[in-house]
Amino acid sequence: MKLDKVLKSLGLDGKALKKGDLIVRSPITGGEVARLVCDDAKGAAKKIGKAQAAFLAWRQVPAPKRGELVRLLGEELRAHKAALGELVSIEAGKITTEGLGEVQEMIDICDFAVGLSRQLYGLTIASERPGHRMAETWHPLGVVGVITAFNFPVAVWSWNTALALVAGNSVVWKPSEKTPLTALASAKIFGKAAARFAKETGTAIPDGLLEVLIGAREVGEVMVDDPRVALVSATGSTRMGREVAPRVAKRFGRSLLELGGNNAMIVCPSADLKLAERAILFSAVGTAGQRCTSLRRLIVHEEIYGKLLPRLKKLYGQVPVGNPLEGKALIGPLIDAAAFEAMQNALKQAKAEGGKVTGGERVSVAGCSGGYYVKPAIVELAKQSPVMTHETFAPILYVVKYKTLAEAIQLQNDVPQGLSSCIFTRDVREAELFTSATGSDCGIANVNIGPSGAEIGGAFGGEKETGGGRESGSDAWKAYMRRATNTINYSDQLPLAQGVKFDI
Ligand code: NAD
């Protein structure tokens, strides 16, 4: 692993990243790659103060000009795509194309946000009073606190940051303690874009426009409780969301939650099975099952079960597991020993609930003895049992049969999470029903596409225990701004609404 070289090309000195209590390991080998000094509560509060001051200056910069900073960020990300993608692989264990794909997603959201910087539209509304105009305007919100998970260590930051910046906000970022190096590298790339912006536009970037907090949940909690942080956008487990949401609500802050998923696919009798198999494989075993949108539950019509399952098991037997940076591996490691334990516990529970388990064993990979590599597992169950209602962040695919589409949709919706879902069918009635009000209850409902790998143009997020937040495309930007309703009287009368008379 050429870590020092990668870090250097991203503007970081690997030798200087060797002091501190936060030990950073690569899941590829389990070996230590850096030690970082964590922010304490006082240091974190100081950074939030700097971000608050930066917000007061940045909100005065016209939105299209703010978009220029994000355009330059996109350019710098393009220039550093290979190195940052490799660092994502080293720190999060993703295979090369997925590491690069993550950076591409950052570039895509920058492009989207640049266009958006000229489209932060409000409405005009018909007033009931003569000589009056009503309108809504959207204003910058304040400091946006971004908490991110290990499995999309940088893309989720960019989704939030590109929108927050064009919206006129500053950002304080608390990356996962498992992936702080990619965060430091992204901050360096942001710094390059900011320097170019200042040079090319003659407008200085306020100090503190982006601050990074290094550490575990304690430092995130400082941000969660600080009234200067107007919006806390938190991505991670449902457990984390349960802790964060009430704390932010207690101080009447806003939160945007992107939490765990438990995503399903329904395979109907008319499905194109070749397509379905490709989609199942990528979404269930890609990223070693460590995507919030990973496929975890497969609901197959009883007529095609006997055909699909053997084909799927054959594919599972062929998919290469190994060092994500070498050879042809399509499945890299789990993030750590705890993730492996959680997977084994889920498989034990599945067996106890009558499941027939294929795969799931630890795989030894040459030169990576400290990494936790596994064979992806298929678990056949007679019915949706309790183990299937939890998100286990590992490549486990639970499979059940169904008879009627109504039953399949009921099974799909009968879990506490509501992130992503899909149906494979060539029957237009089934497809329309699935995406209708009485179909899938998830934030994402696809037809003939797997549940993972969303494009940035759509709003991303889910219902129920997934938290209800929406990020990325569509009108997700509204979460990062505050709305004012303006009523303007250009007449010489003062009529009251609803016909109220108040004359002396
Ligand atoms: P995690 O919940 O352990 O940690 C996520 C982040 O929250 C980390 O930065 C962590 O330090 C921080 N954190 C934890 N407790 C906190 C607290 N009380 N206050 C403030 N910060 C706190 O999650 P993880 O293991 O890193 O990531 C995997 C989880 O994230 C899975 O459940 C996955 O589904 C979810 N996820 C969801 C999405 C989505 O968009 N819905 C995207 C990626 C990951």
Image (cartoon, helix red, strand yellow):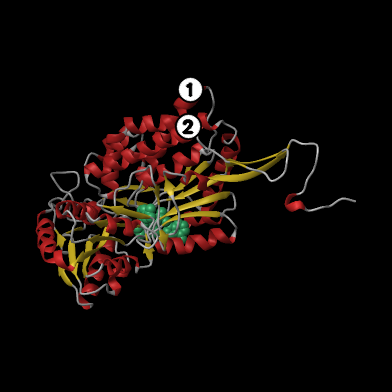
Q: Which residue is disc 2 drawn over?
A: 67
Left or right of 134? Residue 255 is left
Q: Quadrant of residue 342?
A: bottom left
User: Which one is in front, 386 or 233?
Assistant: 386
Q: Can residue 44 be seen in this snapshot?
A: yes
Tag 2: amino acid? Gly
Q: Is residue 109 left or right of residue 224?
A: left
Foreground residue, 285 or 482?
482
Residue 149 visible in the current orientation: no
Of residues 360 and 474, the one drawn nearer to the viewer in this rendering: 474
Pointer 2 or 1: first along the chain: 2
Query: The N terminus appears in which quarter of the rendering?
Result: top left
Name the residue rendered at 53%, 63% in the picture: 246
Which label number is shown at residue 438? none
Task: Determine the image quadrant of residue 363.
Answer: bottom left
Q: Secondary structure at mark 1?
A: helix
Circle 1: is it few (<14), some (14-19), or many (20+) Cα within 10 Å?
Answer: few
Above or below for 8 versus 487: above
- The three-letter amino acid code for the residue at tag 1 is Lys
Query: Residue 4's quadrant in the figure?
Result: top left
Picture residue at 32% right of the left edge, 64% below the top: 391
- Mark 2 or mark 1: which is in front? 2
In the picture of the structure, the residue carrying the numbered disc 1 is 199
- Ligand 1 resides in the quarter of the picture at bottom left
